[in-house]
Image: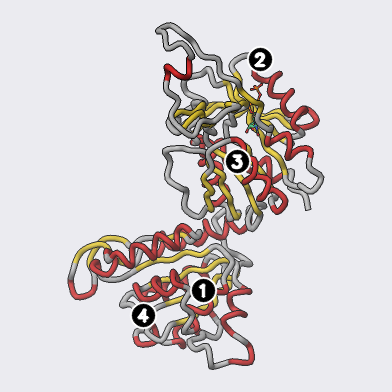
């Protein structure tokens, strides 16, 4: 079936750049895909294009002014009606205002009311695009979940060449289709909590106990959840990975820190995925000062050993499974080296999880540190799905689809 926006309300915001003339063709392209298109223009855009042009193309009134129909509160009305929004072209000025939350005209006021997937297509002169303020604003908008498309590279107004062109129409339409697809996903607008990485249990200011987890699987799940429009909290034990865009990341160190962070987020969550490798034990005594080997081992003689006394950490997943005030779908992981499926099924039962993703971590192309994984996903009532070698991101998509099928409420 050809991709379609049939029955979808697309909001098209146009700002005052030379490329504004291309927005008319974009409006037509959106209509051709079956969308109902609502166009709004900034004052700057009206210097380049006319509302009448968009009204003829969309069959809808084109708004330009917050104060023209005050009784209808147009910015709130058009934002609420939209299923997806695209701002093309988005000038430096528009992007800076969006990032700062300034709402001083119809287009910026509408933006601050939007809660739907949003595409922003910058177009401006290369110098403006490369300015640190523009770059910082674009990064911030991406972190908050907007899809930034372009700018493309090529000939700009005045004959200059460089990055700054409005992306081609087919690329923009593709981005809108993808954004609309996100709005369709059952996890769109739901709250997903993901844990990742290996916790560290301190012994003294320079030493800790930990494990080989690199956080890649958990980060892939957080990114995949954000990509389908979920509101994502990532609780991350130390990793070398950059915070994923569009995700709220809380950094923790120990199992006890992670326990506290997850319990605080859990009551509001719809899905909790516990991909973290949580240390089962922590040193009973944590020294404020670096432990000197002679004092620590007692005699100071070479060959002397030391016995560490360890205390059991709480099992975060099992605690979640026991709590009545938590309605979330619970997804755990099981890292095993032998009898992987039977240990996995045991953890499913003992921890009260809805799904357990079983990982044979003795394989070199699956488990710790690599970008691929091979898992078996087990669920209640004997559910079993094997996922053969795939990227961690692809495995993440499968896990989220299975979790979405089990959503409550
Ligand atoms: N888990 C947890 N809290 C712990 C230990 C584990 O929440 N203190 C979670 C992990 O995040 C994972 C699942 O429980 O989702 C299974 O973790 P795993 O390390 O495979 O198993 P353990 O429960 O630690 O059991 P064992 O070490 O005996 O295999």
- The residue nearer to you, when weighing 170 against 372, is 372
Instruction: Report how far apart the C-alphas of labels 1 and 4 lie in the structure.
Output: 16 Å
- The residue nearer to you, when weighing 30 against 291, is 291
Residue 244 position, x and y percent, is 47, 48
As drawn, the residue found furthest toward the left would be 159
Q: Label 4 belongs to which residue?
A: 16
Looking at the picture, does residue 112 appear above or below residue 234? below
- Tell me the crowding category of disc 1: few under 14, some 14 to 19, or many 20 or more residues within 10 angstroms, Cα based: many
Tell me which residue sits at (59%, 31%) in the image: 278
Q: Label 3 belongs to which residue?
A: 258
Label for residue 339?
Answer: 2
4 and 3 marks in contact (CB < 8 Å): no
Check mark 2 vs ligand 1: CB closer than 8 Å? yes or no.
Answer: no
Which circle's residue, 1 or 4, is located before the other in the chain? 4
Residue 205 seen:
yes
- The residue nearer to you, when weighing 154 against 70, is 70
Instruction: Report how far apart the C-alphas of labels 2 and 1 lie in the structure.
Output: 53 Å
**Ligand 1: image quarter:** top right
- Tell me the crowding category of disc 3: few under 14, some 14 to 19, or many 20 or more residues within 10 angstroms, Cα based: many
Residue 322 position, x and y percent, is 79, 38
């Amino acid at each position: 079936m050809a991709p379609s926006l049939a029955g979808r309300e697309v909001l098209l915001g146009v700002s005052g750049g030379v490329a504004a003339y291309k927005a008319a063709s974009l409006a037509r392209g959106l209509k051709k895909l079956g969308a109902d298109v609502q166009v709004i223009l900034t004052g700057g855009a009206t210097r380049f294009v006319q509302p009448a042009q968009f009204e003829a193309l969309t069959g809808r009134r084109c708004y330009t002014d917050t104060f023209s129909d005050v009784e209808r509160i147009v910015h709130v009305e058009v934002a609420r009606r939209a299923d997806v929004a695209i701002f093309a072209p988005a000038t430096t000025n528009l992007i800076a205002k969006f990032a700062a939350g300034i709402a001083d005209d119809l287009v910026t006021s509408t933006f601050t009311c939007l809660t739907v997937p949003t595409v922003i297509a910058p177009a401006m002169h290369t110098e403006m695009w490369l300015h640190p303020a523009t770059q910082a604003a674009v990064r911030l908008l991406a972190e908050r979940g907007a899809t930034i498309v372009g700018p493309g590279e090529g000939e700009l107004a005045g004959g200059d060449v460089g990055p700054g062109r409005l992306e081609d129409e087919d690329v923009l339409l593709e981005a809108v289709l993808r954004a609309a697809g996100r709005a369709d996903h059952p996890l769109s607008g739901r709250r997903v909590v993901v844990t990742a990485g290996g916790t560290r249990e301190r012994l003294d200011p320079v030493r800790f106990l930990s494990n080989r987890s690199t956080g890649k699987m958990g980060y892939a799940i957080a990114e995949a959840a954000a990509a389908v429009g979920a509101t994502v909290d990532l609780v991350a034990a130390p990793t070398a990975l950059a915070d994923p865009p569009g995700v709220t990341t809380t950094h923790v160190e120990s199992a006890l820190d992670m326990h506290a962070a997850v319990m605080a987020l859990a009551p509001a969550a719809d899905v909790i995925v516990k991909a973290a490798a949580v240390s089962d034990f922590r040193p009973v005594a944590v020294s404020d000062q670096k432990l000197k080997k002679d004092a620590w081992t007692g005699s100071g003689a070479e060959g002397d050993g030391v016995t560490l006394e360890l205390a059991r950490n709480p099992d975060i997943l099992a605690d979640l499974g026991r709590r009545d005030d938590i309605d979330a779908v619970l997804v755990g992981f099981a890292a095993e080296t032998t009898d992987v499926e039977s240990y996995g099924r045991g953890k499913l039962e003992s921890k009260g999880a809805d799904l357990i993703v079983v990982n044979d971590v003795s394989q070199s192309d699956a488990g710790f540190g690599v970008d691929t994984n091979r898992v078996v996903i087990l669920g209640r009532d004997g559910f079993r799905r094997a996922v053969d070698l795939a990227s961690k991101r692809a495995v993440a998509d499968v896990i989220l689809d299975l979790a979405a099928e089990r959503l409550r409420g």
